[in-house]
Image: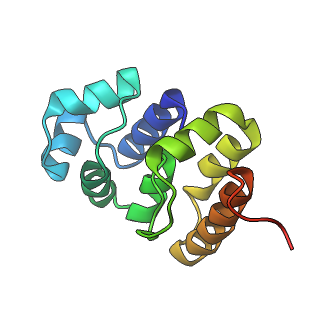
Amino acid sequence: MNSKTWSEVIKFHRHRLHLTSRSLAQKAGIDPSYITLMERDGHIPSREKVVALAHALQIEPSALLLAAGYSPDMPDSGISNRTVSSYCALIPELRQCLRELVGLPKKQQREAAKMLHSYLSVLAGRRTVK
């Protein structure tokens, strides 16, 4: 995921809840300077911290994981954060789709994640379209 997009997602949801950086950090159990690092520099934290942020921001963890470039709810998917991020850097349409997925209900996110997984598998040459 584009680091600018990631920082925009964090800022948007923090502002939506009228939280300061410090209060978000406290709710997520992370250092306040880490929030600044994410919002200013687009730093993408570990999967565990993304989940903690999702809970603090009152959004589905899978939505924020997807926004961060992680594959949500698919531990055996074979898609790593690096794979998703590199495809996002190369394919603007995919990056836009990921941004739009953040606002979908969890059930729709799961369906979209399955389609995305299939799409990335085809791009990676692991499987052919039937």
In this rendered view, identify the residue nearer to me: 122 or 70. Answer: 122
Image location (x, y in percent) of residue 26: 13, 45
At 17% from the left and 35% from the top, the residue drawn is 22
The quadrant the C terminus occupies is bottom right
Q: Residue furthest bottom?
A: 107
Task: Tell me which corner region of the image, top left, top right, bottom left or bottom right, holds residue 91.
Answer: top right
Up the image or down, 78 lies above or below 34; here it is: below
Residue 30 at x, y percent in the picture: 14, 42
Question: Residue sitting at 57 percent across and 68 percent down?
Answer: 109
**Image position of 83 (left or right of 52):** right
Residue 70 place in picture, x, y as percent: 45, 52
Instruction: Decide which of 100, 2 is in the foreground and name it.
Output: 2
| Above or below, comparing residue 4 to residue 29 in the picture | above
Instruction: Please identify the quarter of the rendering in which residue 62 is found.
Output: bottom left
Is 95 positioned to the left or the right of 33 in the image? right
The residue closer to the viewer here, 81 or 63, is: 81
Q: Residue at x 31, y 52 (%)?
A: 47
Report the residue at 54% width, 32% height from top: 2
Left or right of 30? Residue 126 is right
